[in-house]
Image (cartoon, rainbow, N blue to C red):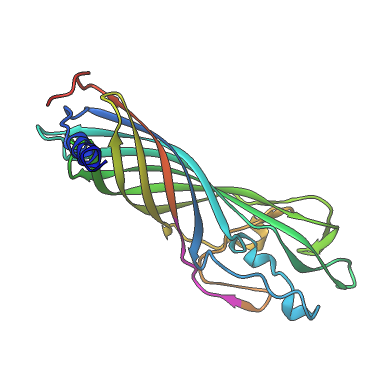
Amino acid sequence: MRKLGVLLCAFLLLSASAIYTQPKLTLHLTGGYGVPLGDFKTDLPPTSPVTEDNRADADYFPYFTKQLLNFGVDGKLAFGKQGNARVTMGLTYNMFSNNADAIFRINPNNDLAVTTFKPKVNVLSISLGGEWAFAPKKKVNPFLGAGVAANFFSGEFEFGREVRIKGAQRTGPMDMKSETRIGIIFDGGIDFHLSPQVGAIIGVKYHMINPLGKGADDPSEVGANEIDLGDQEHTEDGKTFPNRTISSINGYVGVSFYFGAPKTVKK
C-alpha cells in the first residue's frame, strides 16, 4: 500500500508539472453564485409592527436583492512568447433576486398589509480588460485580471397581491427602468488543463458596478410602471437619498476550450 501511495503521488506531481504549449485563444463558459455588496445589499424593513415606517419604499426596490446567479462567456487572447499577458473580453448575465415578505400600501386610503415581494434586477455586463497568467504552459495555471465593463440594467418587481405604489394600484409586476453604468471587474482564479483542447476553470469576481454614470431621474422621466435605479444623491417627496455604491462578489466554475495550440503534450 505504501508503494502504491508513493506511485500515486509521483503520478500526480508529474501530471501537475506537465508542460503544454500556450494556446493563443482560450474560451470559457461559466456559471456562478454570489451576493450583492455595498448599498446594493439593503435589508427589507421588518414586517412587524405593520407601520408606515416599515413600508417597503419604491426608491429602494432595486436594492432589496439578496442573491446573485450568473452565467457568461469570455475569451482570452495571449501575447508574447510565454503567453503570460492576455487581452480579455467577456459577456456576463447577472441575475440579482430575493423572495421575502414586505409591507406595502394596498389602497388609496394608504392602508397597509404584508405580502410576498420578489425583486429581480438583471445586469448584462460587457467587459474588456487584461490578465496575467502565472503558468500558461503548465497544467495548473493561476491568473489575475481586471477590466472595464458596460453594465445594462433591467428587471421587474413582483407582488403577492394588489398594492398601491407611486400613486396607482398595481396588479402585475413593475419594471426596472433601463439604466447603463460603467464599472470595473477584478477577476482571479485557476485554469486546469485537462487536455490540450479542454480544461476546467474556477475563480472569483469582484464587480464594482456603478463607479461611473450614476444618475437619478426626475419623476417625470420615469414611466408610470417603472422603478429607476436612483444611485445619485437626490431628493424626492421631501426625502433625501445619498449616492449609492453598487457592487457584488461571486464565485464561478466553468469549462475551458483552447485554440491555436499543438495537440501534443511535451514531457
Please say if 246 is above or below 111: above
**Quarter of the image where the C terminus is located:** top left
In the image, 113: left or right of 42?
A: right
Magenta span includes 244:
yes
Q: Residue furthest left?
A: 81
Residue found at x 71% / y 69%: 56
**Residue under the image location 43 percent in, 51 percent down:** 251
Quarter of image, res 62: bottom right
Image side of residue 151 versus residue 235, left or right: left
Residue that appears at 51% across and 45% down: 70
**Residue 16, x across and y down, in percent:** 21, 38
Give percent across and percent down for residue 93: 51, 42
Q: Which residues are magenta?
A: 240-249
The magenta stretch spans residue 3? no
Measured as percent of width and height from the top left, residue 11 is found at 21, 35
The furthest residue to the top:
263
User: Which of 195/62 is in front?
Assistant: 195
Q: Is residue 37 above or below residue 4?
A: below
